[in-house]
Image (cartoon, grey):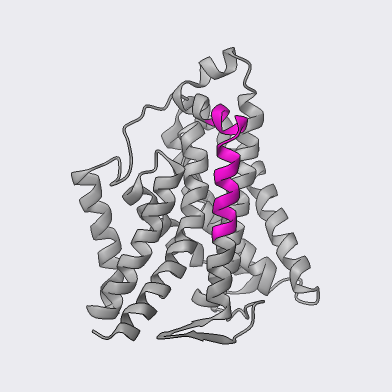
Amino acid sequence: MTLETFVLLLAGGLVTGSIYALVAAGYAVLYTATGFVNFALGAQAMVAGYLTYVWFDTLPVMLRIVIALAGSVVLSVLSWVLIYRRVAEKDILAAVIMSFGFSIVLAEVVQLAAGGIPRPARSPAGTEAHTLGPLSISSHSVTVLVVSAILFTLLGLALSSRGGLAIRAMFQDKEMAETIGIPTNRVTLWLFAVSGIFAAAAGILAAPILSLSPHMGTRLALIAFVGAVLGGLGTIRSAIAGSVLLGLLEAFFAGYISADWRATLVFGVFIVVLVAKPTGVLGRVAAVKV
């Protein structure tokens, strides 16, 4: 094991872990307030990737990014209002299963519209590599780390405000939150909008690394969920930390043992955590009332 290899794997793990963490943050934002896990966030990330790199390709790239972010917000909010909300009020598990179905629908629609062949995506940050001692890192990887850090910081600031208190109150008891005047329906819509932004950011940042395909979001959604469970889905910070940790584990496992067995590692970790500590290594036990 050389220092250069270790540093490269560390950087790669942080980059992929940050992308997983963006989707995991979207899961946790919704779960901590509503108890709902939206597995369609991975598909929304995929759609945002196509909006940025495939469709509207005659427009400036920054405008395409804005369109992708806005489209993901609209898709996220409308999916709650038109598809999930009524079902979630009666059976939250049924709504979660519906989100799986919706993700499949989105993937099939994109496949019909754009074809199923994977497409390379050119990063808006360019292909330049930066060297710092033993580390050589691309401009896109730096962009992933910087954008993720900014979004996580903004989310943390928002959660430390009065809005964050409202979310925690909803997590503990939604009916009581409504009784004390918290507009739970409006807060839920805002949370779905936030989850849409994080999903879109993940898709835009992941596409140059993974290549675009209609089913790219499925893998992203599942691995991000494992990362969220690893850290603890009950808190947003632990879900983010668990996803970054999973990215690091995946990178070092691929670098030192076998890249072919990465999927086995991911879902092996999932099973071990569910058996040994279902609340996650950083999580806490909490009851959600919906």
Residue projecting furthest to the front: 133
In this rendering, is residue 261 above or below 171? below
Residue under the point 59% across and 14% down: 180
- Image check: 82 left or right of 253? right
**Residue 169 vs residue 27, the one in the foreground:** 169
Residue 246: x and y, percent?
34, 61
Residue under the point 80% across and 77% down: 58
- Image check: 280 left or right of 68? left
Magenta span: 149-167
Residue 87: x and y, percent?
52, 31
Residue projecting furthest to the right: 59
- Image check: 30 left or right of 121? left
Does residue 107 appear in this view? no
Residue 144: x and y, percent?
55, 68
- Image check: 55 left or right of 222? right
Main SS of the magenta part reads helix
